[in-house]
Image: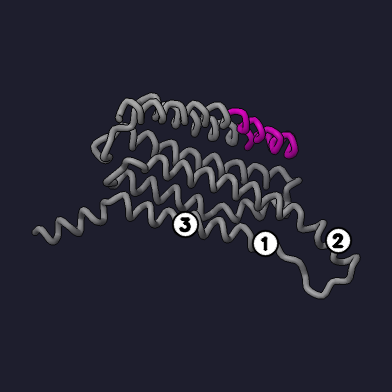
Amino acid sequence: MNGHQRVWDDEGSAARLLALSDGVFAIAMTLLALDITLPAELDSDGFKRALRDVMPNLWAYALSFLVIAAFWRGHHQMFRYVREVDGTVIRLGLLSLGLVALMPFPTTLLAEYGDLPQSVAVYSGAVAAMGATQLALTVVLWKRPWLGSATLPDPVARNDVADLAWTVLIFAVAVPLAFVSPTGAKLWWAVLIPVKAVTGKRGKRLRAAAQRVGA
């Protein structure tokens, strides 16, 4: 009986889910770069044309790398004090990782067909979906303090929820906006930069205050 209990506890540990998450995030980041290639044995003019043609791929790679990196960082912050996970957390975590693993596909669409509304809409929807699953996971962990080694302070949790909610909102709005203007939708993504700056600074301040109180 004790042996079976140890196995169950191991399967329900946050460390196992985090290990899987790190692997999925790393593979997704690596796959983003596969489309960045140039044909071999080009002459000078051909090289210049090929280099110019690959620039959209580089731009899409950089954008998606930053997006995935931001979600990875948030994922680790979310699980910083989590010791165990239950079925709901595992299901939401796997759904989130499935969406992360899918990101190379909308990234390729954005690189190859970035002027088409469908491509911009698919990319926006993919990021919004990732944000929504991470938002749901944050709320679940916040409302289940018994899974953690320490309780996440409510102000910190509310700021994290607001940060992810803004991400979901901005990219969700970009989906219909893409069918009006693909360029306008891509410019609309930039609204997230000042929002992230504000919520990021507030989050650091709140976490520092919580650490002082805990000390």
Magenta span covers which residues? 173-195
Marks 2 and 1, the one that precedes in the sequence = 1
Disc 3 marks which residue?
24
Where is residue 136 drawn, in percent x and y?
41, 37
Where in the figure is residue 94, as x and y percent of width and height? 40, 51
Q: Is residue 34 above or below residue 176?
A: below
Horizontal and vertical percent position of residue 105: 60, 55
Q: How is the image coloured?
A: one colour
Instruction: Say which residue appears at 51% left-offset and 51% top-offset.
Output: 100
- Count neighbours of disc 3 (C-alpha within 10 A) and say few if under 14, some if 14 to 19, many if 20 or more: some
Numbered badge on residue 122:
none
Q: Which residue is mark 1?
A: 35
Q: CA distance from mark 1 to mark 3?
A: 19 Å
Residue at the extreme bottom: 41
- Of 130 and 58, which appears nearest the observer? 58
The residue located at (62%, 45%) in the rendering is 123
Q: Which mark is residue 49?
A: 2
Q: Amino acid at mark 3?
A: Val
Using the image, determine if residue 168 lies above or below residue 24: above
Q: Is residue 59 left or right of residue 64?
A: right
Circles 3 and 2: CB atoms closer than 8 Å: no
Residue 75 lies in magenta, yes or no? no
